[in-house]
Every structure is written in C-alpha cells, then in structure tokens.
Image (cartoon, rainbow, N blue to C red):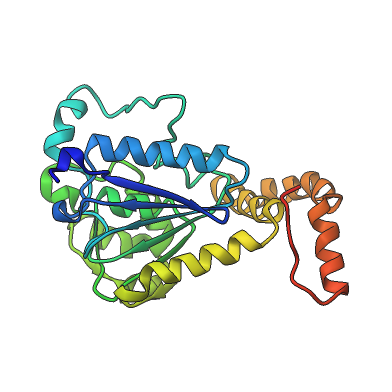
Amino acid sequence: MNESEKVKVLVEENNHILTITFNRPEKYNALDPESFKLLSKALYRLENESHLRVGIIQAAGENFTSGLELDKWAPIFAKGLDIKYAEDELDPYSVAGAGLSKPLVCAVQGLCYTSGLELLLNTDIRIATADTRFSQLEVQRGIYACRGGTIRLPEEIGWSNAQRYLLTGDTFSAEQALQWGMIQEIVSLEHLHQRALEIAEKIARAAPLGVQASLRSSKLSRTHSQAAAFEKVSEEMPAVMKSKDAQEGVMSFLQRREAQFIGS
C-alpha cells in the first residue's frame, strides 16, 4: 500500500471515547495538510456529538510526531498563517481554551516536536514514555513557535524553564516534563495506549455534566481569572445539582453501587 492509499489519521469510537491515532510512522507521524484536516474534523466530532465524553490523541510507531511536514505546508504558509477551517473542523490549537468542552488525554512517545508539543499543550492529561523528547526547535529553523508554544509552555513549566528551551531549540526529557508537571505519568511503550485508555474510561464513567463543568471552570480560571470562574460556578451549579446525573450520584452512594450516568 502506498501512502496515498493509507489512512493517515485513524479515528475510532468506543464506549463514549473517541481515539485519534496518527498513522504515518514511516514519516515520524509528521502532520501534512491532509493529516491536519483529519485531526481537525475528529476534534469537531468530539465536541459536537453528545454521546462522546472524552478524546484520546496518540500515535502509531516509535514517535508521536516530528511536527508539521514543512515542505507540504510551505505553499500554504506563503499565503499567511491564518489557516481557514471548514464548518465541520476545529482548530487543534484552540482547544486549550473554550474551543473544546470535553477532556483530551494525550499519549506521546519518541519525538514530540514543534507543533506536536504545541498540540500536547492543548490537551488536559498527558502521559509519555521515558524516551520521549520534547522540543520547540523553531528558532533553529529561522522561525519561532507560532501555535501557542511561546504562551503555554511558560505557563506549564515556568518562565525560565521555558525560555531555556524556546530560545535554544534544545530538547528536554520526559523526566524533566514530569518534574515540571507538564506530563502526569511516565509509562512503558507497550502500555502507553492502554494506560491512556484506562484514564479515558475513568473519565467516561464519571458524570458528563460534572466533568464538562469542571473542565470549563478550570479553563475559565486559566484564561480569564479566578473571580470569573467563581462567578460562573455560582451561575451553573444549580442546574447541575438538579440534573438526573446528580440524583443518580446520590442514589448510587446510598445504594453502595457504581453510578450509571447519562449526561442529563
């Protein structure tokens, strides 16, 4: 099978979970325009299909992604960096804010470079293998990180830690990322995808309204202020407390059983 016949991004739905898998291991899972479009469409689907509760972004092979396939993107970038999205697409680099109301788990290995690292910074729970190498190496190519790396990396790992790598383009390790809190676990390669699924399944079993409200509140505090988030909690909590899921939560506690949430 030649590359033109291959599905570059696999999208699978199972038990309220949408799993998105980069599938170009022979190209270090570099994202060409077609791969990027498939990712954008999958994220739109996650946001807009009510039965989906959580997403996973992962990759086949030994590497997460080396970043954008620049020779394929050069003609597009020559016209400007303002990428246009269709109505059924969602900007992958906007989902750290209000762009996505559902959680994303990200599982990375090997190379997690440039736009791949910026993508990871747009997700909510991250795990990595011990051999993962992270880099915003754009300054070594005559440019700089333009999809949020200069904004989100300092927030995630601290100002000076971020500048140490943003200004040099050097790589940092999974162990460093864990110490800084940028990733939550280091997992072996053979268990990486299974562990991501376990985390996603636990989220999917929780009350969807509660999960989405919790994520929304956290994002609001991050992008606006704690005061704005507290104000929104006061507005939204009564509706959540009156939901069928809240009633189910109380009943499951009283009956000593696992709750079965329906998202309403």
Task: Report the number of numbered marks.
Answer: 0
Near-viewer residue (7 or 206): 7
**Residue 155 falls in which quadrant of the image?**
bottom left
Q: Looking at the image, which residue is at 45% across and 54% down?
A: 123
Left or right? Give the position of 177 relative to 217.
left
Q: x and y percent of residue 93 in the render?
A: 39, 42
Q: Is residue 150 above or below residue 248?
A: above
As rendered, which of 253 and 186 lies closer to the eye? 253
**Is residue 229 at least partly visible in the picture?**
yes
Q: Residue at x 48, y 37 (%)?
A: 44
Residue 192: percent from left, percent from top:
36, 70
| Vertical arrangement, residue 190 with respect to residue 171, above or below | below
Q: Nearer the viewer, residue 257 or 69?
A: 257
Instruction: Tell me the residue at 44%/66% (across/down).
Output: 196
Q: Residue furthest top?
A: 79
Residue 158 visible somewhere in the drawing: no
The residue at 32%/75% (across/down) is 190
**Residue 64 position in % (x across, y down):** 27, 59
- Furthest residue to the front? 1
Q: Position of residue 117 (x, y in %)?
A: 31, 55
Answer above or below: position of 3 versus 230.
above
Residue 3, quarter of the rendered image: top left
Say above or below: 188 vs 259.
below
| Quadrant housing residue 56 | bottom left
